[in-house]
């Protein structure tokens, strides 16, 4: 299991690189003022909290039971897509409280969901799988083990499908972040005159 610092750094610098780029560019060109800091801090807060949501039971178990058990909250595994709805709801709640705009709240919820999913991806790499599909499938699945299958033992078609699914999942999380950041004011712009 990667440590919390690794989860937050992975989300901020790998997945939210558009926001990091926009902030660094704005600082470099002196376009950033103190009134621009609250939305940036809000993104950092929501992303950091939601990327750590799957390990919320580790804090509880450490305080109450003295161990780091962290994979279940009642009958629901915390490292599943069904539990990720807690991140969407949290992001939407914070977004609505901050902006008083339902549209921006939805985008902040989407951003929070992507933060949550980066935790699952990083744990998948470190531990070899998560309970992504609970309750449809109760076992651990590994997105990244799909990449490691060869086409000689499975056939070319299965090899291509497995490769596509694993890479598509990572791409999907990145596209969620880019879509949400675009609607929250962070964007790359295409300029055909260049």
Image (tube, grey):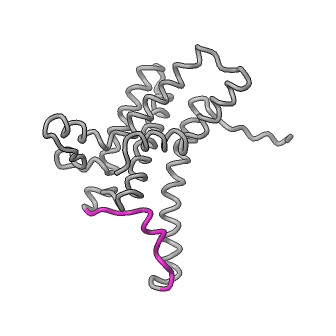
Magenta residues, start to end: 139-152
| 146 is within the stretch colored magenta | yes
Task: Give the image location of residue 166, x and y in percent.
Answer: 48, 63
* Residue under the point 54% across and 25% down: 40
* Residue under the point 52% across and 59% down: 168
Q: Is residue 28 above or below residue 88?
A: above
Q: Is residue 97 above or below residue 110?
A: above
| 47 is within the stretch colored magenta | no
Task: Give the image location of residue 194, x and y in percent.
Answer: 85, 41
Task: Give the image location of residue 48, x and y in percent.
Answer: 42, 34
Q: Report the front residue among 33 and 111.
A: 33
* Residue under the point 31% across and 48% down: 82
* Left-right relation of 69 to 17: left
Q: Report the front residue among 95 and 61.
A: 61
Q: Residue furthest right?
A: 193
* Residue under the point 53% across and 66% down: 164
Task: Give the image location of residue 180, x and y in percent.
Answer: 54, 37
């Amino acid at each position: 299991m990667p440590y919390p610092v690794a989860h937050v750094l992975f989300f901020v610098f790998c997945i939210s690189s558009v926001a990091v780029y926009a902030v660094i560019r704005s600082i470099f060109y002196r376009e950033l003022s103190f009134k621009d800091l609250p939305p940036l801090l809000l993104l950092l807060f929501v992303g950091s909290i939601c990327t750590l949501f799957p390990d919320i039971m580790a804090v509880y178990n450490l305080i109450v039971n003295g161990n780091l058990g962290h994979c279940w909250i009642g009958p629901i595994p915390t490292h599943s897509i069904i539990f990720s709805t807690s991140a969407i709801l949290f992001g939407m709640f914070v977004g609505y409280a901050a902006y008083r705009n339902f549209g921006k709240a939805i985008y902040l919820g989407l951003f929070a969901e992507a933060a949550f999913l980066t935790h699952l991806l990083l744990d998948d790499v470190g531990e070899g799988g998560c309970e992504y599909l609970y309750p449809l499938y109760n076992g651990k699945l590994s997105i990244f083990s799909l990449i490691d299958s060869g086409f000689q033992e499975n056939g070319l078609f299965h090899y291509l499908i497995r490769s596509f699914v694993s890479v598509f999942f990572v791409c999907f999380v990145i596209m969620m972040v880019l879509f949400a950041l675009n609607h929250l004011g962070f964007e790359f712009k295409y300029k055909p005159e260049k």
